[in-house]
Amino acid sequence: MSFDRSIKIAPSILSADFANFGAECEAIEAQGADWVHVDVMDGHFVPNITFGPATCAAIRPHIKTVMDVHLMIAPVDPYIEAFAKAGADIITAHVEAGPHIHRTVQAIRGAGAKAGVALNPGTPASAVAELLDMVDLVCVMTVNPGFGGQKFIDMTAKVRELRDMIGDRPIHIEIDGGVDPTTAPLVAAAGADVLVAGSAVFRGGSVTDPAPYGANIRAIRAAAEA
Ligand code: DX5
Ligand code: ZN
């Protein structure tokens, strides 16, 4: 994975057909997705359950780009090895998920993956200040995690602050939650480069009719780059 700050659209398969993940991953990539965002939820850290490392391993052969695994689980550390073995390129853990995020980030990199840290809307940018020399991505949640299709919470000031803190370091700023052609320009202008979008990408399409995925991806990208 090479680093650059161009806009990357990362559809979240949380909004895909759960009975058809492989075909959905192939469809969104064929329609222009830059990364594939994989939301893992445990019913404990967040009030919803999705899937675990076995599903990640099963979909891996269907992803040619970047498998971006967002762990909304607590504890995190006992499962890092399993998600790395499943083929995650990036593993993102929440700073709120436990008392030892520094150890978690070390463990993610130690397992051979790129390391991301995620911040809930109620958590300040300063929570990652001591981690900036050891992470590859900071994810700014623009919803409280747990569900797709929620309303965007404006975290533009936090994104700007992080962009300043990051300086020249090769760290992606990812936005997750409520991203669509209306909200994408706000966060892109503030310095974000990876835009996760679930409902705004999958709306109107299916694996048998994937063209709307492409139109949706292009609309978000065009708005962000404008
Ligand atoms: C929320 C997840 C997001 C979510 C985004 O807990 O982390 O990735 O699927 O979905 P939309 O784009 O529908 O808000
Ligand atoms: Zn996510």
Image: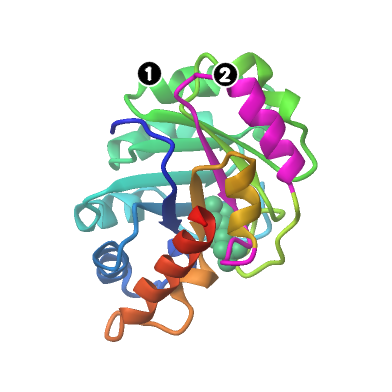
Q: Secondary structure at mark 1?
A: helix
Front in this rendered view, residue 211 or 199: 211
Q: Are marks 2 and 1 in contact (CB under 8 Å)?
A: no
Q: Earlier in the sequence, mark 2 or mark 1?
A: 1
Residue at position x 50%, y 16% in the image: 134
Q: Residues within 10 Å of mark 1 (few under 14, many from 20)?
A: some
Q: Which mark is residue 3?
A: none
Q: Verify whether residue 166 appears in magenta.
A: yes
Q: CA distance from mark 2 to mark 1?
A: 17 Å
Q: Secondary structure at mark 2?
A: loop
The amino acid type of the residue labelled 1 equals Gly
Residue at position x 51%, y 61% in the image: 197
Q: Which mark is residue 110?
A: 1
**Can you identify the residue that label 2 sits on?**
132
The reply to whether residue 53 is in sight is yes
The quarter of the displayed image where residue 170 is located: top left
The reply to whether residue 43 is in sight is no
Front in this rendered view, residue 100 or 149: 149
Residue at position x 27%, y 70% in the image: 27
Reply above or below: 34 against 27: above
How was the colour assigned to the protein in this rendering?
rainbow
- Taking the image in four quarters, ligand 1 sits in the one at bottom right
Front in this rendered view, residue 184 or 81: 184
Residue at position x 46%, y 62% in the image: 222
Q: Residues within 10 Å of mark 2 (few under 14, many from 20)?
A: some
The amino acid type of the residue labelled 2 equals Leu
* Pair 2/1: label in front: 2
Give the extent of the magenta segment: 155-182
Reply above or below: 19 against 176: below
Q: Does 193 sit left or right of 205 as displayed?
A: right
